[in-house]
């Protein structure tokens, strides 16, 4: 069974540009969550999608957005990039959206904003 | 609030036992997860505790006290490959809140 796949693995962008990251969950998983990981802030929750609907959202500005498609694949978009957006962006998939549900993480996309 | 606290760094010797503590705010508690993350890699699931007590899984064990808002991860017979960050997390409703992670260095 294939794991969570994130593309691209590495990305370099310039301030002001926008970027789209992709996540393919484990087959059969319907919940996809996105996280930002930086050395200073640790792992921080961005948002979660379940059955194409955003279920919950963390404390990030509106420049961060996402969506989920009918096949459960998800994309995350960051507009007007800032230097502080440089981070590892992790996607996690779960069988369902629930309190006791284990999350399986992808390898992440390392975004560098210059 | 959903603050989760862990020590930032720990060091231990190969073959030893180490205990990594985690404290959290009990409101909205839905179970405590532990994840391991090697440098440059994705976090991987280690354990999940929802009831009080100790859960053992090979060299790793996890303990939970819901009344105290406290958990620990116990690693026995440490190996060099156990050098990693260990993250505790609570699933508050529909999103995980992670602690800052404890970076464990295992020395020969």
Image (cartoon, helix red, strand yellow):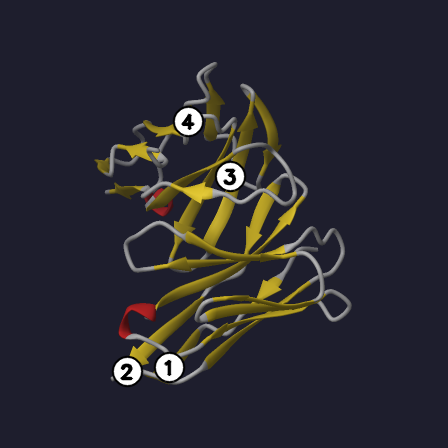
User: Does label 3 or label 4 sit earlier along the sequence?
Assistant: 4
Label 1 Cα crowd, 10 Å radius (few <14 / some 14-19 / many 20+): few
- Residue at point 42% right, 27% down? A27
Image coords of residue A61 (percent x, y): 52, 36
Image coords of residue B19 (percent x, y): 50, 78
Q: Which mark is residue A27?
A: 4
* Dots 3, 2 in contact, CB < 8 A: no
Q: CA distance from mark 1 to mark 3?
A: 31 Å
- Of residue B3 and residue B76, the one placed in the foreground of this image is B76
* Dots 1, 2 in contact, CB < 8 A: yes
- Residue at point 44% right, 71% down? B59
Q: Which mark is residue B107?
A: 2
Q: Which mark is residue B11?
A: 1
Query: Please, which chain is the residue tagged with disc 3 on?
Result: A
Q: Quadrant of residue A7?
A: top left
Could you confirm whether marks 3 and 2 are on the same chain?
no
Q: Quadrant of the C terminus of chain A?
A: top left
Q: CA distance from mark 2 to mark 4?
A: 39 Å
């Amino acid at each position: 069974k294939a794991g969570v796949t994130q593309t691209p693995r590495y990305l370099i962008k310039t301030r002001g540009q926008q970027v789209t990251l992709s996540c393919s969950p484990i087959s059969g998983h319907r919940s996809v969550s996105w996280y930002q990981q930086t050395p200073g802030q640790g792992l921080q929750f961005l948002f979660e999608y379940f059955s194409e609907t955003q279920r919950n959202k963390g404390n990030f500005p509106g420049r961060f957005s996402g969506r989920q498609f009918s096949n459960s694949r998800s994309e995350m978009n960051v507009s007007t990039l800032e230097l502080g957006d440089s981070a590892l962006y992790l996607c996690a998939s779960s069988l369902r959206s629930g309190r006791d549900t284990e999350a399986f993480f992808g390898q992440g996309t390392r975004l560098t904003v210059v | 609030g959903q603050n989760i606290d862990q020590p930032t760094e720990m060091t231990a010797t190969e073959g030893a036992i180490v205990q990594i503590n985690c404290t959290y705010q009990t409101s909205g508690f839905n179970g405590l997860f532990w994840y391991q993350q090697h440098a440059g890699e994705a976090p991987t699931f280690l354990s999940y505790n929802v009831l009080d007590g100790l859960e053992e899984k090979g060299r790793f064990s996890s303990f939970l006290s819901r009344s105290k808002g406290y958990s620990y991860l116990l690693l026995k017979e440490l190996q060099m490959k156990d050098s990693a960050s260990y993250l505790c997390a609570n699933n508050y409703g529909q999103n995980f809140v992670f602690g800052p992670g404890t970076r464990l260095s295992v020395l020969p």
